[in-house]
Amino acid sequence: MTDLNQLTIAEARDLLRKRAVTAVDLTMACMTAMDAADGLNAFVHKTPEIALEQARAADARLASGAAPAMCGIPLGIKDLFCTKGVPSQAASRILNGFRPEYESTVTQKLFDAGAVMLGKLNMDEFAMGSSNETSCYGNAVNPWRRGNDTTPLTPGGSSGGSAAAVAADLCLGATGTDTGGSIRQPAAFTGIVGIKPTYGRVSRWGIVAFASSLDQAGPMTKTVRDAAIMLGAMAGEDAKDSTSAAIAVPDFEAALTGDIRGKKIGIPREYRMDGMPAEIEKLWADGAAMLKDAGAQIVDISLPHTKYALPAYYVIAPAEASSNLARYDGVRYGHRAKLAQGDGITEMYEKTRAEGFGPEVQRRVMIGTYVLSAGFYDAYYNRARKVRALIKRDFELAFAAGIDAILTPATPSSAFGLGEMADADPVQMYLNDVFTVTVNLAGLPGVAVPAGLDAKGLPLGLQLIGRPWEEGDLLNHAHVLERAAGFVSKPGKWW
Amino acid sequence: MSIDIETARRVAKLARIRVEEAALPELARGLSGILGFMEQLNEVDVTGIEPMTSVTPMRLKRRADVVTDGDIQAQILKNAPDAREGFFAVPKVVE
């Protein structure tokens, strides 16, 4: 039998319900794996007491009969989620010492369903980054390596700790958040599944805000089925988040019929970028062939404003961030700078924010401040919002023409080395999100599915984009792709 | 559009982030690079297009105008760097 921490959520659920394993044993196996994996720097605050208490409660519930699918499943929680009494600092020095007095809606729903929290996971500071290198906790490390080369690689970002922890079997699943690709890019870099749901599907209450018109939380798991199970427990209308939609949550797992005959899959020509590595191009073509073999129809489509998605995103996201991050002022929570004699409240704000925010966060807050400032608001912010409307319309026209799902690469490359982008222009790092960011701008669901290995032995992912509120149908397409690709590789354990 | 040192100083001030004088040229260069990337948006014809305000078509919900919590002063002050006598404490604001 495999070690318990290597189980999928679906396998563990079935064993737990049969009482073939206990939630306590499963949790202990994950904690042992977690404690042996400090070299990955994925878990940054461990919560073993909470985990064991939740596991014992889950066992009692399982023993009494009907228990939800997530009952007794050990998870990692991204540090962006507020968890009551447990450090929740969005990987930022400015929230040093912050222990929320409340629970985020997503973690509360998972706990209500019986899930077990092993601890909090590393990430880019305030979810701003694509490599987990902006974290105040230091880099999270990808469990995958380039063959025998020991160069540490990025797990991607911003949900880098979540991706590393799931790929290394430290937990059965993890929460992530995705503003421009922060679930899907790290999932692709680590050979796991990650879905960003439709905007409004999952409540954002209690999740530290980055860009409120783009942020969505979603599951990061080992399989598509697990993503369907976990998303079902996270999703749903919430009175505390006025943008959460009053739309019933279907049984996503039941949608995994494996039948996509007659479905129309769009291949957007604008995603074929200049200088795209041949391996990515081949992976994409192979993915289309797999869906065709399963009975789907492959259709070339055009999303003409794709090229403008990244610049529009890098106006809108920093603008919203500059507003959301105004709350970190050293008054109500977190870090306050030591003040000099005679310093007033303005010095307190300025020193606190200079000490508390890292360079990338400072850069984005200042870009956002600039594009929102008098005289530039129309030229940058309003223009970006108009371009965003056009990007969304591109997708609406494709879906109106009968397209069921859109297939693209998830990332322009496999995982790169930590530090390799240190001297690059910030814009070079932003290019990591080139295939994922359109989905956030349009508010659509998107899922990354591991589809193969590159010549260096690193995982590569494909992305499927679905119609709004059709996560079930989208996951069914992903399920077919996952089965056809037959990706079963795991990173060799070195940590 | 390139950002000069004076503009960089003003943006830092508006953002309430202290930037040392010596760091301003580097900041101005960094911001200029990113703004240059955004210039591509000027290629798009946006005539007659309304700025997107809502991601999914929805009317913002309203809740009943009733008190839903309260009497949690201790919880609210729990994480304050400096709380005194039931208040958040800050440096002197008025001379």
Image: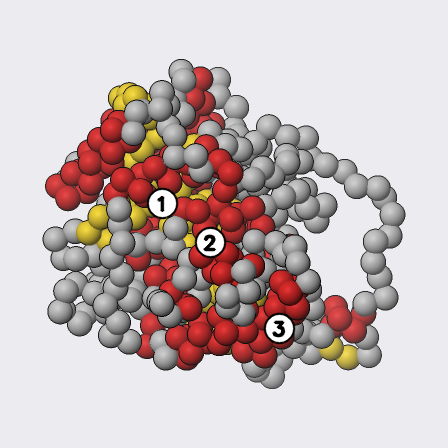
Residue labelled with disc 1: A448
Numbered label attached to residue A421: none
User: Which residue occupies 84% across, 41% down?
Assistant: B64
Residue A160: give x, y in percent of width and height.
38, 61
Q: Give the residue type that dot 3 points to.
A: Arg
Instruction: Reply above or below: A331 against A204.
Output: below
Task: Name which of mark 3 and mark 1 comes first in the sequence.
Answer: 3
Q: Is residue A288 above or below residue A458?
A: above
Circle 2: element type: helix
The residue where tag 2 is placed is A10
Mark 2 surroundings: few (<14), some (14-19) or many (≥20) residues within 10 A: many
Residue A302 % position (x, y)? 30, 22
**Mark 2 — on which chain does it sit?**
A
Q: Is residue A76 visible?
A: yes
> Is residue A434 rendered to the left or right of residue A31?
left
Q: In the picture, which quadrant includes the C terminus of chain A?
A: bottom left
Residue in the foreground of this view, choosing between A302 and A9:
A9
Q: Would you call the spot at circle 1 few (<14 residues within 10 Å), some (14-19), or many (20 or more)?
A: many
Which residue, given by chain and number where applicable, does mark 3 sit on?
Answer: A56
